[in-house]
Image (spheres, coloured by chain):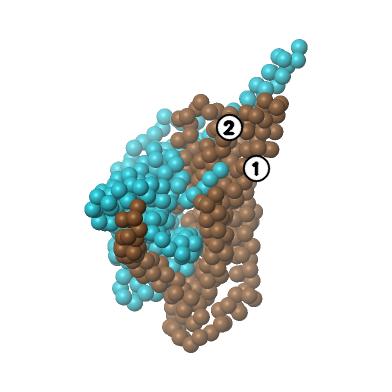
Chain colours: A cyan, B brown
Amino acid sequence: MRKPKSKNAFSWKQAAGVTMMLAFLFFALLPIIWSFILALRPENRLFEPIWESPTALTLANIGKLADSGFPKALLNSFITASVSTALAVVIGVPGGFALAKGRSSRKFLASWALLLLRMAPPVGFVIPLFILYLNIGFLDTWWGLIGAYMVLTLPLVVWSSWTSLSQIPDELIEASLLDGATMGQTLRRVVIPAARPGLVATAVLAFLLSWNDFFFALIITRSDTVTAPVAIMNFVSYASVDWGSIAIASIVLTLPTVPVIVFANKYIVQSMGGAVKG
Amino acid sequence: MNQISGVQPVLQRSYRLMLLPAVIAVLVFAVLPLVGMFVLSFTGFDLVKGWDTGFTFDNFTKLASDKRFINSVWVMLALSVFGVIAQVIAGTLIAVGLEKIIPRWRHVRGFFVVPFVVPHVAVALVWLSLFTPTLSPINAFFDLFGITIPAFLTTRWGAISAIVIADTWASFPFVMLLILAALQGISTDLDEAASIDGATKMQVFWRITLPLLKPALLMVALFRFIETIKHFPLIYVMTNGGPGRATQATNYYAFIQTFQNSKVSYGAAIAVFLFIFAAIISFWVARMNARLSDA
């Protein structure tokens, strides 16, 4: 008699666990599904519950978005995020390599400084940058924004290439040097290919940091170089909020971040958190 | 090996050469603005009145008696503490659930990562729509049963909860990913030994899994804590600091003083306060990280 009873109790717990996971899944997906509904609803049905007219859908918002200033803002976002990521990788990866494999007594200081730069509130960087840019005419320019994004990307790239390049075995580097390669050749031909997944994840994260940025762009750009996250706010005015355009613009803005989901594995985790062990 | 140690000094020099551009770039792009922040905070710069370059401590003494500043610190702490607690609990439950309750639903994992990659301005806008009573499907659904959901964004604690909920949605995947990584590092031998000895699943979770997760949990909580201090798009888009000053966190208050009231130096002093806060927490994280890497 006891055995079936305990089995029964067990499956109740299992059911409760599965229910909890489904509830979390609902929480995770509701805003996503809701964005798609908002994006596809015609303007005159927006304030009507979706179950009252589930087939009243339209693609009009896509055309409207294409005709607005949003595509140009997307281009601004793409250019500034790409250039700041490329610069950070070219400058930062050799630095991360040197920190991973070179000898230094100041490594703790370096790790604290890098962490602090990643954690420091952006408002502290943006106030002096704004005053500087105001005086040298860098406000609302690509280079001004790229300079600001280096604040985000560089510490991240140095920190996480340091983490991922520490895992390259010393023997590999020694063998390459014994074969007569220079340090630069060893980095390019041996170390970087061996650590490629981790470094790609680092570059993807650096790109996303700039791509998703709202604060720097809000302060530094005006009309010419406004980036997509700030341009979305053009659909919000005191008189009305254009929810359809906001939703479709949000979806377009999120699309380039999808590779991260594909990459959502240990490499991304390493780049984000450093060495977190159980 | 002898050859290697023979070239060591040369090697160290080339390592230093590789480090040099990064050091210079970090100094120019990141450290220099911070120096500017400190200089501004100890002088008097006003976008309207101009720059009084004489050294002064006024900005900091003013901070101590500024009620709006003190209010902003409490708001910041409320948003951070409630936000971090909610995210860590949700992220950990989901990570443990994915591993122990539904280990076979591999493809579900990706869905839980989605919110993490949505840009924060989009997060803020979609939650603003969900908290707009006339628009929200949640309100419409409960209306079917005659239940009226109160308008969150018009009350003090409602607005704080709304931001905490939106932030939890955007950030639980970060906690989940790091805890999943930590769980995979824990050997299953202990679990098995405990269940053979008659421990229930709950006991295994509370007595074995959770204590082993403690370092990872503390690290994740600190990472999230520092991120919640930097809240900007959520507040700017969802509440604009309101109702009243109910969600005007310190970071947001620095923005208002600098860019809306033109009091640049005063804003810089608030930024210095936040910077020192971040310095203490990052020192803690760096030390924990150094210990974990040595272990």
In the image, residue B101 sits, relative to residue B250, either above or below, namely above
Q: For residue B238, say whether it is visible.
A: no
Q: In this rendered view, identify the residue nearer to me: B233 or A48.
A: B233
Q: Have a look at marks 1 and 2 and say if they share a chain.
A: yes
User: Which residue is painted at 55% across and 79% down in the image?
Assistant: B59
Q: In this rendered view, identify the residue nearer to me: B51 or B88.
A: B88
Q: In this rendered view, identify the residue nearer to me: A211 or B243.
A: A211
In the drawing, what numbered circle is on residue A258?
Answer: none
In the image, residue B238 sits, relative to residue B256, either above or below, namely above
Q: Position of residue B24 (x, y in %)?
A: 35, 68
Horizontal relation, residue A2 to residue A160: left or right: right
User: Which residue is painted at 31% across and 56% down in the image?
Assistant: B3
Horizontal relation, residue B168 to residue A216: left or right: right
Q: For residue A10, say whether it is visible.
A: yes
User: Is disc 1 in contact with disc 2, using a CB cutoff of under 8 Å?
Assistant: no
Type of amino acid at the residue the image marks with label 1: Pro
The chain letter for the residue carrying disc 2 is B
Q: According to the image, label 2 marks what residue?
A: B188
Type of amino acid at the residue the image marks with label 2: Thr
The chain letter for the residue carrying disc 1 is B
Q: Residues within 10 Å of mark 2 (few under 14, many from 20)?
A: few
Of the numbered discs 1 and 2, the one sitting upstream in the chain is: 2
CA distance for labels 1 and 2 = 14 Å
Q: Position of residue B288 (x, y in %)?
A: 56, 55
Q: According to the image, label 1 marks what residue?
A: B211
